[in-house]
């Protein structure tokens, strides 16, 4: 599967999460939804990895990278839902998702020495503008939640950058199993303080099963397959198809009104994604500094500075 197509499909699956929760009609605490989603997703990923790549699970892991990637996933879940609760859905989502490509561009440069391509700049600007149009203005905007939204964007970028390094030695499902296993362990303490009684109705249970299996496990396997050969900055920008998907589902399934502002937002995101789709594949790197060998001043040009060529007669 083409790497960018895999990332786009993952973003589309992520975009269904809001609609799934709305159709479930659950009044669960957002943090509880995020924690249950991660734990279910981690369980599915671990099962998949155990079936397809058991040696990859038991061989030594890059501990620091796996811990950082798992922390990024957990940070995104906690910070995003807290930001939405403080700032409002529109403002929190726009600031969190819109800041992620910028953070990814910086981390991709620092961690993997990936210099964003020229196409990335206009594509990211258009995609972020589209998110702003879709989010619109929110009278409930509270700058108290802005740091939480920025932490969420950073967490998503951090998990992507570190996961890319893990993917160099692990299969996608195995890498994501390790990352989400760490995230699940970090979020498990939330279950001691949050009510889980909302999971009892079959409709809520079905919605969370969908979120865990499809919108988390399957989506992140697809994302990781694309991330393995796509620069971190471009991968995170492509994931901005998520708010576009959410807007379209809200329009057709939840019968939300379509405004001129929303149409402009969708158009900007699609145009940005089109620019990235036409981008030449490859991982542009920052040129490495090479150390030049000292200038050769040997009087005989047929002899090498580090040894004679051809070899001298030992006699």
Image (cartoon, rainbow, N blue to C red):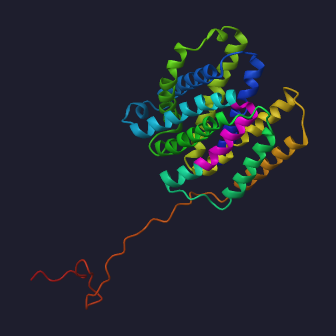
Q: Quadrant of the N terminus?
A: top right
Q: Is residue 1 visible?
A: no
- Residue that protrudes farthest toward the bottom in the picture: 299
Residue 2 drawn above or below residue 183: below
Q: Is residue 92 magenta?
A: yes
Q: For residue 251, what is the image quadrant? A: top right
Q: Is residue 94 visible?
A: yes
Question: What percent of the width, then of the height, locates residue 290?
Answer: 40, 69
Residue 82 drawn above or below residue 150: above
Q: For residue 59, what is the image quadrant? A: top left
For the stretch drawn in magenta, the main secondary structure is: helix
Question: What percent of the width, then of the height, locates residue 149?
Answer: 64, 37
Q: Is residue 142 magenta?
A: no
> Residue at left 26%, top 85%?
303
- Residue that protrudes farthest toward the left in the picture: 315
Residue 194 drawn above or below residue 61: above
Is 30 on the left-hand or right-hand side of 288? right
Q: Quadrant of the C terminus?
A: bottom left
> Residue at left 37%, top 71%?
291
Nearer to us in this view, 314 or 102: 102
- Label count reads 0
Give the extent of the magenta segment: 87-103
Nearer to us in this view, 176 or 269: 269
Question: What percent of the width, then of the height, locates residue 244?
Answer: 77, 39
> Residue at left 54%, top 56%?
114
Question: What percent of the width, then of the height, locates residue 252?
Answer: 86, 30
Is 233 on the left-hand or right-hand side of 183? right
> Residue at left 70%, top 43%?
240
Is 146 on the left-hand or right-hand side of 111? right
């Amino acid at each position: 599967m083409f790497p960018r197509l895999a990332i786009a499909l993952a973003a589309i699956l992520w975009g269904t999460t809001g609609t799934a929760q709305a159709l479930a009609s659950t009044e669960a605490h957002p943090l509880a939804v995020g924690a249950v989603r991660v734990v279910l997703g981690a369980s599915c990923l671990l099962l998949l990895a155990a079936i397809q790549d058991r040696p990859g699970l038991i061989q030594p892991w890059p501990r620091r990278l796996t811990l950082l990637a798992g922390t990024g996933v957990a940070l995104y879940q906690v910070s995003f839902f807290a930001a939405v609760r403080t700032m409002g859905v529109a403002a929190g989502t726009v600031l969190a998702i819109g800041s992620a490509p910028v953070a990814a561009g910086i981390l991709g440069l620092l961690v993997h020495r990936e210099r964003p391509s020229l196409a990335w700049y206009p594509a990211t600007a258009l995609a972020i503008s589209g998110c702003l149009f879709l989010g619109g203005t929110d009278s409930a905007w509270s700058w108290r939640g802005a740091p939480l939204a920025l932490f969420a964007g950073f967490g998503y970028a951090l998990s992507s950058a570190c996961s890319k390094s893990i993917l160099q030695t692990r299969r996608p499902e195995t890498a994501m199993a390790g990352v989400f296993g760490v995230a699940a362990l970090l979020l498990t303490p939330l279950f001691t303080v949050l009510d889980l009684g909302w999971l009892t109705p079959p409709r809520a249970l079905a919605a969370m099963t969908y979120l865990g299996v499809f919108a988390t496990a399957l989506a992140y396997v697809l994302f990781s397959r694309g991330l393995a050969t796509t620069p971190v900055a471009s991968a995170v920008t492509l994931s901005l198809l998520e708010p576009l998907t959410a807007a379209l589902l809200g329009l057709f399934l939840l019968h939300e009104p379509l405004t001129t502002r929303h149409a402009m937002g969708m158009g900007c995101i699609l145009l940005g994604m089109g620019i990235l789709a036409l981008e030449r594949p490859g991982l542009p790197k920052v040129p490495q500094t090479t150390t030049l060998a000292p200038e050769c001043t040997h009087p005989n040009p047929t002899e090498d500075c580090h040894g004679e060529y051809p070899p001298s007669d030992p006699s």
